[in-house]
Image: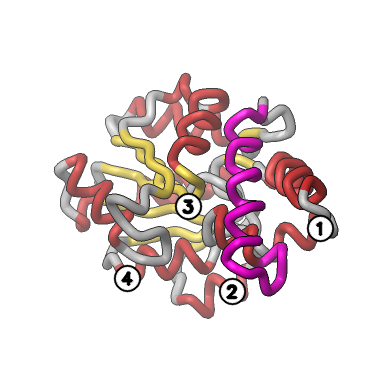
Amino acid sequence: MKKLVIFDLDGTLLNTLEDIRECLNIALENHGYKTLSTPEVLKRVGYGAKKLVELALGNPTNEELERVFNDYVPLQAKSDNSKTVLYDGFDGVLTELKKRGYKLAIVSNKPDSVTQIVCDQKLKKYGFDFITGNRPELFNPKPDKSCVEYCLNSMGIAKEDAIYVGDSEVDVKTFVSAELDGIGVLWGFRPKELLVDAGCKHFASTASELLDKILSF
């Protein structure tokens, strides 16, 4: 049995896409840029807020990027995340994992301030033991393994005692680089083919299937 389950946030635990799109489009519109559709935003998420803004703008100057990014992050922090929902079946999964004695963590590429807010709004009842978003003063964002290593070191848990769960090629590259066991979920923001190409070997199509796979490690 593993001791710790590390979850990605967006596209894995929570469907945050519509709230991300809404905040991003307000920031883009505020500065005179073209807004994006949901499929267009979907293609650009996964590498953190600054990369999302950069990809949304196309080929921005540093000044343009900073201006829109510095508008977008506060908009996310102020959002009530009314369109963000826990994926089907996760209430039972998280409750059962805690019941069985697993530690639960979240490592997200969202800015840490935004990550803490949305987790407090949507996930507080599940008693996560460790939550972090992107904190560039302490570690690099995914797919760099330093963010996961920071989590493990902070919790005092060896990599062989942890398993990582995510929905994207970014997540797969992260747990492969960190030499963690990992599971790719198929309800999130990326198709299975991208996860396979990144090196994922274990998959879950439903929350109940995910629970069974976690318990099997």
Q: Is residue 174 left or right of residue 28?
A: left
Residue designated by label 3: 109
Q: Position of residue 186 (x, y in %)?
A: 61, 58
Name the outermost residue toward the top.
Answer: 125
Helix, strand or loop under label 1: loop
Q: Is residue 134 visible?
A: yes
Amino acid type at mark 4: Ser
Nearer-N-terminus badge (4/3): 3
Range drawn in magenta: 55-79
Locate the C terminus and report the quarter of the image it occupies: bottom left
Examine the rendered structure and indicate whether residue 159 appears above or below residue 172: above
Residue 71 within the magenta-colored segment of the rendering: yes
Name the outermost residue toward the bottom.
Answer: 197
Q: Position of residue 88 (x, y in %)?
A: 65, 37
Helix, strand or loop under label 2: helix
Residue designated by label 4: 177
Q: Is residue 200 left or right of residue 18?
A: left
Q: Residue 175 falls in which quadrant of the image?
A: bottom left
Nearer-N-terminus badge (1/2): 1
Q: Position of residue 152 (x, y in %)?
A: 23, 48
Question: Disc 2 versus disc 4: distance between alpha carbons?
Answer: 16 Å
Nearer-N-terminus badge (4/1): 1
Residue designated by label 2: 194
Nearer-N-terminus badge (2/3): 3
Question: Disc 4 versus disc 3: distance between alpha carbons?
Answer: 16 Å
Residue 197 within the magenta-colored segment of the rendering: no
Task: Answer whether labels 3 and 1 touch (C-beta < 8 Å).
Answer: no
- Residue at the image point whose x is 71% and y is 63% from the top: 56
Which disc number belongs to residue 33?
1
